[in-house]
Amino acid sequence: MELDEIEVKEFVINIETPDGKLPPARVTIPNLPMRLADIVPPIQKLCSGVVGLAIKREIVLGSTLSCHKGCGVCCNQLVPLSAPEVFFLYEYVKSLPSDRQAEIEAKFAEIRKAMDSVGLIERLKKVDETDEHQTLALEYFRLGMPCPFLVDEACSIHPVRPLACREYNVTSPPELCADPFKNKILRIKIPRNMTTATAKLASEVCGAPLMVIPMPLFIEWAEENEYINHLAWSGIWLFEKMLEYATGSNADGERNES
């Protein structure tokens, strides 16, 4: 098939949230094979837009955002990733210079060793059966193992950081974040959780149980499930499915064929 014969669709994405309406976004998707990892960048942009509106709402109401560069306490928490994010982040790490890649992988291996020493890994694998989410998150936090992407108390992958990190913003006094499980932390409410949305998409298209992967285990999970990363679907169909989960409705679109 010649390039000018490929079907394309222009999506005009109009997102309304309780905090306002995002500026219309136009995305042109060719009807070519698309993998789960390929849908992460547009979801990241959508997530940042929704979060930005929520932050503006809190500021208008008189709150002050406590999160700022140099405050990396939340980077000691257990970050959940959807399967599409796992593959996207895995490919990102593999694109880094070999020395930086080795440094990151070594730090994740160190965290995994610490988790294994207290039985966290096995318990995390059974968390959906035991419903110990909060307990395991607290135990992980108590390990005091900062995210390997944290450099000088700042996120070194900020432009491509996970959806859960984008959605974690607090307005309570920053000193309370020293122990977010003991202290009352006021998090800004986000109307739609994008980590869950992308996890649901992966579950449907792969015919697999709904799951999220703890960030410390993402490298080994990506390698163990590499075959999933090679699966591909019609780009237009997959993007439409993504929007259903991300926005709760279908996006308006105009189809242009050339």
Image (cartoon, rainbow, N blue to C red):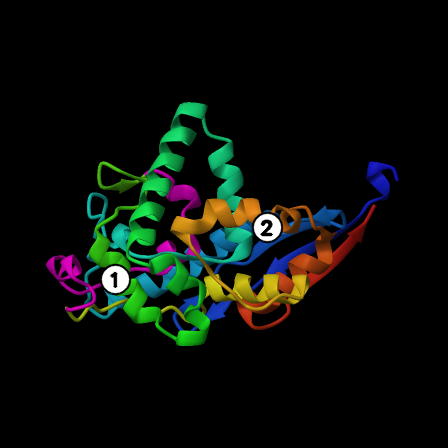
What residue is rendered at 40% in x and 36% in y?
105
Q: Is residue 232 magenta?
A: no
Quadrant where the C terminus lies? Answer: top right
Which residue is the extreme one toward the left?
Answer: 175
Q: Disc 2 residue type?
A: Asn
What residue is rendered at 36% in x and 47% in y?
112
Q: Which quarter of the picture shows residue 99? A: top left
What residue is rendered at 64% in x and 51% in y?
228
Residue 77, relative to residue 111: is it above or below? Answer: below
Q: CA distance from mark 1 to mark 2?
A: 27 Å
SS category of the residue bearing label 1: helix
Which residue is the extreme one toward the right?
Answer: 1
User: Is residue 30 shown left or right of residue 247?
Assistant: right
Task: Provide the residue designation for mark 2.
Answer: 225
Please name whichever residue, 211 or 120, is drawn nearer the observer in this view of the structure: 120
Task: Provide the residue designation for mark 1.
Answer: 139
Q: Is residue 177 magenta?
A: yes
Q: Earlier in the sequence, mark 1 or mark 2?
A: 1
- Which percent across, then down, holds residue 137? 30, 63
Q: Disc 1 residue type?
A: Glu
Quadrant where the N terminus lies? Answer: top right
* Stretch of the chain drawn in magenta: 156-182
What residue is rendered at 32% in x and 60% in y?
168
- Which percent across, then down, holds residue 219? 47, 44
- Which percent across, then down, holds residue 73? 21, 52
